[in-house]
Amino acid sequence: MYAITIPEPGGPEALVWAEVPDPVPGEGEVLVEVAASAVNRADLLQRQGFYDPPAGSSAYPGLECSGRIAALGPGVSGWSVGDEVCALLTGGGYAEKVVVPAGQLLPVPGGVDLVTAASLPESTSTVWSNVFMIAHLRPGETLLLHGGASGIGTMAIQLAKAVGARVAVTAGSPQKLARCAELGADILIDYNEQDFVQELRKATDGTGADVILDIIGAKYLDRNVKALAVNGRLAIIGMQGGVKGELNLSALMRKRAAITATTLRARPLGEKAAIVAAVREHVWPLISTGRVRPVVDRVVPMAQAAEAHRALDAGDHVGKILLTTTA
């Protein structure tokens, strides 16, 4: 098969479409013929040499894919060769074939084509696990999303609205904020022109956000705490703004607030399977009925993955950028 390899870390040009050995499914695994994968920030970090895959996982980038089951490993039940699926991966999605633990498979939801389904596993799993399973967003509460026009953001807006929450978003342009509004966002904040703490206080009569989903990290840590409501929950899932920041514990304690920080890639198989099962139970019906829809910015041939990485780096996209083996 062919896959995107990284002979040496570097810029987008470091991604090389090369012939590599076919993977073989082991106990509890399936082999998927990949129709499409999606580009995530973690892939950019891996390309640059800053985010090595966990031991024992594929060396190729790609944290999600869609395709058809080509073979079943020993001990797999409930799936058949030929099933159309999408999957949460530890790596290897930028390839024509990938091996997946059966617990990380999802059926392609109704109303979604096979290529578009590649946009779903990582964003739905990240949002559902952090916003709902950990931070317990409830109807009537306010969720603040940083990067509202991203793949994570566009999914989080829709899921939060589906459960009856109010949604505030930050984004870097009026055009991106307009797209967020189309998806249901209630409070629109241009981070280049406005202070999100002040704007959120105005919009919530000084209360703040009950839950914040943050992709920035250290740069926003202090301001995020200021933006939290009493009993608020800050979920950190990214470090685009650095890894070290000062935390005012007094402010956190006065608000009886909580901070969590998670990654998805390195979690044990059992935890990933539990998250995927929860997504299938709670999110898949919303997608199948059209209440929540995948947002895809563009589709790029997988052999041209460098182009897709440049687009994500440029930050002018809304939603997910997909790589397809068939384009």
Image (cartoon, rainbow, N blue to C red):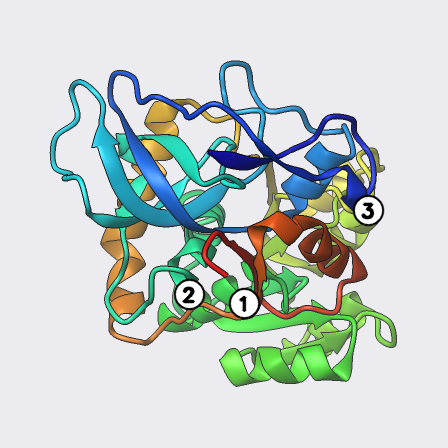
Horizontal placement of 253 versus 185: left or right? right
Q: Could you tell me how far apart the alpha carbons at marks 3 and 1 are, in whole angstroms? A: 20 Å
Label 1: state its secondary structure.
Answer: helix
- Does residue 81 appear left or right of residue 299 in this picture? left
Residue matched to label 2 = 159
Judged from the image, the secondary structure of the residue bearing numbered disc 2 is helix
> Residue flagged by tag 1: what amino acid is it?
Thr
Q: Residue furthest right?
A: 193
- Nearer to us in this view, 21 or 229: 21
Mark 3 burial class by Cα count in 10 Å: few <14, some 14-19, many 20+: some
**Along the line of sight, the residue nearer the viewer: 88 or 12:** 12
Q: Residues within 10 Å of mark 2 (few under 14, many from 20)?
A: many
Q: Which mark is residue 54?
A: none
Mark 1 to mark 2 CA distance (whole Å): 9 Å
* Image location (x, y in percent) of residue 13: 79, 43
Amino acid type of the residue tagged 2 in the rendering: Leu
Instruction: Tell me if residue 253 can be seen.
Output: no
In this figure, which residue is indicated by the disc labeled 1?
154
Residue under circle 3?
Answer: 241
Secondary structure of the residue carrying numbered label 3: loop
The CA span between labels 2 and 3 is 25 Å
